[in-house]
Image: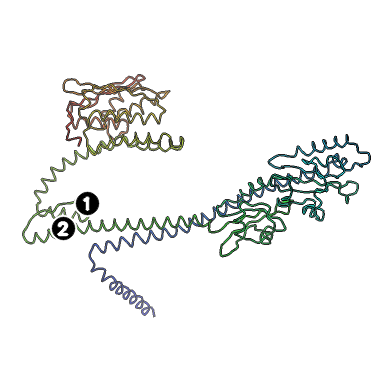
Amino acid sequence: MVMDKAFCLYYTGFMIKRMMKSLLKPVNNLKFRTKLMISYCIFIIIPLGLMSFFSYNQVSKTIESLVLYSAKQNFEQTYSFLNYKMGKIIDISDIIAVDQNLTEILMKPLENYSYTEQIRDAQDLTSFVTPFENEEDVYRIRLYVQDSVIYSQELVNLFSMSDIEGSEWYRLLVSGKDKILWCPGYYFASDSNENASVISAARMIRDPNDYSDTIGIFRIDMLESNLKDIVRKANTTQSGVAYLQNSDGLVITSSDQELMKSFDVESSFSQNLAGSADNWQETHREGDRLLVGSKAIIGTDWFLVSIIPYEEILSTGNTIRQQMLVLLVALTTLAYILAFYMSGSNTKRISRLIKKMRKVQEGELEPIKVTPVKDEIGELMETFNYMIHRIKILIEEQYKSGQEIKSVELKALQAQINPHFLYNTLDLINWTAIKHKVPELSSLVQSLSKFYKLSLNKGRDIVPISDEIQHVTLYTDIQNRRFENKIHLSIDVDDDILEYSILKTILQPIAENSIMHGILEKDDQSGNISIRGRLEKNTVILEVQDDGIGIDIETVNDVLNANPKESHGYGVRNINNRLKLHYGQEYGLTYTSKPGKGTEVVIRIPAIKINESELV
């Protein structure tokens, strides 16, 4: 039984192996370049596609939850603010309804009620209600009194009861059971005395001795525009809407009347939602997926309702999906181009090697041109050349080795000169942009651009002294932007030597040393750098002097002679080595310094006029 099971496993593996070989047989016969292209596409396009797919799902879910959270937070804040506002109105109405002085005035019999006393009472009533009025909460308080008193025609705060007996809101107030009637603005559309659109809270004033007897009515008016502004804040989306409606389904105010009508959410739906445990629910209207939130305003029959189309919630995710698709297509195209180029580059070298090998069979012993790429194909080419012309290759390689070492040393010395300056300057650009909102960024970038243009110099190592002067001036200008113009640079170079040649990037590292390790180490972090230049016989003398903290004699010797592994003075040693390597041992740098006084660096180079061909 065990033997049969082992045989079945062996046979299954054998058949799978044969099947794989048969499937791969057509691939094995393809050209090497085609195989490379297929492998590149498989290992680049598929991972990119999967990464984009999973990234989009995660990002879209995160964005959706954040948008919903933000919308609900805004809704809750607006709801809390409305509760606070309505609570103030209710408190004011309670104060007015139970005020003893007010009720005593309204209950006075008319038989012995003189005009003088009525005028005095009118002043008292007005003085009582006007302190409650302000543009933010209470626009106006209207007090409706008996027709027979003369102050019923005051028509600012005091009005006649007969003026409202035929109105809809009066009928609802008298017949209703609630102590406060919350009135939409269109209840007062026919009121010719009202210029501003208002929303009101109306209440009856009862006789304290006979609660069934109404002795007056007052109305607290609020500006509809103020409520509209509050409701607008509940809506955080462009195509959403927020509004207030009462228990009869009538809209009090809305952030956008037309949008509210287009969604057409039934008032019963929003009222039932306000009474549920979760105040948010999805619904569909004419194919649109909507998220509806509703909560009852405490002490009123109003409901705050917010409607958010799900299409807008998902729009940011859809935008990201489109951007990711565009990026995926761009990366796939770029990957294909790179794969095509790389495969072509590799197979082209193999084809060249095969052709040379065939010519060797015909008796033509010529070396193949070796590319600088040091991969396996490059090694094959080098080995082929070694086999054909071993001695010649050894001689040529010995010659080239010395030249390459010298070139590499020069390039390495240049590359080691203060790369951190680039990072500091770029960091400065970033913080300057943030702090000053870009007013100085253009000038700074231009200075930095000129600085690196002079640094690179189209790959040339020799520049005019005038370029070096401009280079160090730009560097100091950039550093002054960083250190608030605390470094003063003075240039005193004879015009006669400006067109003499010099190795590039000589003055700038020395000036940087003066700033970083001299001037900025002082207490006030400010100082002066002077650069002087003159011609003595056949030697150009450049002097860089600062008034920094200076260095002791041991450190001076360390700067020029220390082990290159030590970090202190590394850039200056590089300059000294470059000058001696290029011009000879009698040239280079000389340091003198006095601690607390400053440092002077003297540069000596041969006086050589710049060659016009070197500037092209």
Q: Residue furthest left?
A: 363
Q: Amino acid at mark 1?
A: Lys
Q: CA distance from mark 2 to mark 1?
A: 16 Å
Q: Amino acid at mark 2?
A: Arg
| Residue at 30% over, 60% down | 40
- The secondary structure type at the circle numbered 1 is loop
In the rendered image, which quarter is residue 7 located in?
bottom left
Q: The C terminus appears in which quarter of the rendering?
A: top left
Q: Give the left or right position of residue 483, taking residue 76 as reference.
A: left
In the rendered image, which quarter is residue 223 located in?
top right
Q: Which is more toward the observer, 102 or 583? A: 102
Residue under label 1, please give it: 374
x and y percent of residue 516 in the render?
Answer: 36, 29
Whether residue 303 appears in this view of the structure is: yes
User: Tag 1: Cα neighbours inside 10 Å, few (<14), some, or many (≥20)?
Assistant: few
Q: Which is more toward the observer, 70 or 612? A: 612
| Residue at 67% over, 53% down | 244
Lower sequence index among marks 2 and 1:
2
x and y percent of residue 549 in the render?
Answer: 36, 22
Q: Which mark is residue 160?
A: none
Q: Which mark is residue 352?
A: 2
x and y percent of residue 444 in the render?
Answer: 37, 34
